[in-house]
Amino acid sequence: MTTYDVVVIGAGPVGENAADRIVQGGLTAAIVERELVGGECSYWACMPTKALLRSGAALRAARQVPGAREAVTGELDVAAVLRRRDSFASNWNDEGQVSWLESAGIPLYRGHGRIAGARVVEVTGADGSTTTLTARHAVIVATGSSTLVPDIDGLRDAKPWTSRETVAAKEVPARLAVIGGGVVASEMATAFSELGSSVTMLARDGVLHLNEPFVGERVAESLREKGVSVRIGAEAGSVKRNDDGTVSITLTDGEQLDADELLVAIGRTPNTQDIGLDTVGLKPGGWLTVDSTMRVLETDGWLYAAGDVNRRVLLTHQGKYQARAVGDAIVARAKDEPVDDGEWGRHAATADERAVPQVVFTDPEVASVGLTAAKAEAAGLRTRVVDYDLAATAGSAVHAEGYRGHARMVVDEDRKVIVGFTLVGPDVAEMLHAATIAVVGEVPLDRLWHAVPAFPTVSEVWLRLLEAYGR
């Protein structure tokens, strides 16, 4: 039996960050991983997907600027794009991540980790051997999530692509069908259409429908311009993998579509089915409900859950943010120090509820933080919504010919602070953090007036929005 102050199940970015904060705080921590150290983000999500998308974005950017446009003499080199993608996934080798764990003083136990009781984790290795780890203070579940495959007739038997198979594809299919209209569906429709696939997108609930309405409209329009068949309201009724390897999708209205591959991207499910939750009175396969310091509510204080698995926000950067909070909170409790778990406290993940930034790397890019206008209204806030055409800024004309974009800020009229901000347009991702600071800092509009944007940049939209508000 091996004992540590904390045992972390899951060595993705969330588990790594939590373990590091614990060690930096003077405690000991061990980490358990059944797959690759570095997790979904490193090998099947954030990094390789953005590598797939970047080449197309760079080519589009060059073609939108006279002078550069004339220098572009060819199309994307698909093989080169895939090689670059592979390099960003470290060719699915975690040696570098393992070396980091060693340098940080965090022991790695490879195998499947299962909770065997309060503060006890059993690790089953590939050879069937079992190692028992005991935690003096806490166990953190950071096992993440997997693609949700819905109960559509024949879908599982058809072995569809999930985000993993799509990101790691060795060849680009001639025809790709996509079930879903969210972030993964929209980004992969963008990437594969630019790599040469004929893409059909079955977006039952719309494209990026959780964002401001103009976001989905702009992205759907752009996808259609790329040749993507965007089918709003379409729903798959049954799926069949044919003898020749192709896929047939029958819609609920009876129409049949054929494709070479099918991507399912309608949501996520927690990786909690086989981690021993039943041994401590919790339901296997369910999301873990936590307090503001990531402590699982149904336990007596020793079990924590961070990242996707607690369903607060399914984004890598928010998971890492939670990891820092939970690591520091565990250290404080272990040392009998005060826990600052109030609103915006050091040990509380308040931003999960108030200021979540997100970028969708479609064409155009989407960058948002905080509440949409609809969500602010539903929260009972008295708001004013201010919109502005990004193309009306001087910087947009310098940035690209034919620049199209839009900005919206949602203002809490009682406090005169911004509670939501959305940008859609070319290369808006790098503009988002200014909005995030404004929302998190609850900077009054009268003070924002003195944050003068440089000219000529697209960030001049801040001035224009404040002018439109009536400052």
Image: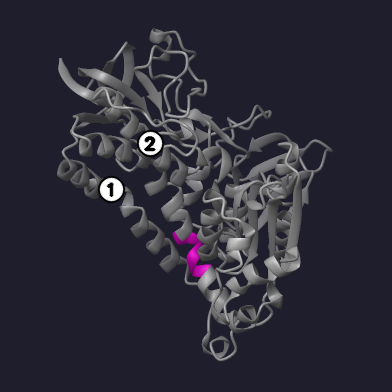
The residue carrying mark 2 is 325
Q: Give the image location of residue 111, x and y in percent.
A: 27, 27
**Relative vertical location of residue 308 with respect to residue 290 in this rendering, above or below:** below
Q: Residue at x 52, y 20 (%)?
A: 286
Dividing the picture into quadrants, the one containing residue 128 is top left
Residue type at mark 1: give it. Asn
Dividing the picture into quadrants, the one containing residue 388 is bottom right
Residue type at mark 2: give it. Ala
Left or right, 419 with respect to 437, comes to: right
Q: Residue at x 60, y 42 (%)?
A: 265
Q: Which mark is residue 93?
A: 1
> Looking at this view, is 258 or 324 the one in front?
324
Q: Give the image location of residue 21, x and y in percent.
A: 27, 38
At numbered mark 1, what does the secondary structure look like: helix, strand or loop? loop
Dividing the picture into quadrants, the one containing residue 295 is top left
**Magenta stretch bounds:** 51-56
Answer yes or no: is residue 35 visible: no
Left or right, 96 with respect to 362, comes to: left
> Looking at this view, is 19 or 276 the one in front?
19
Answer yes or no: is residue 173 visible: yes
Residue lying furthest front in this view?
446
> Looking at this view, is 344 or 186 the one in front?
344
Q: Marks 2 and 1, Cα distance to the nearest angstrom?
A: 29 Å
Q: Give the image location of residue 112, x and y in percent.
A: 31, 24
**Relative vertical location of residue 421 with respect to residue 399 in this rendering, above or below:** above
Which corner quadrant holds the C terminus? bottom right
> Looking at this view, is 93 or 331 the one in front?
331
Q: Residue at x 31, y 31 (%)?
A: 34
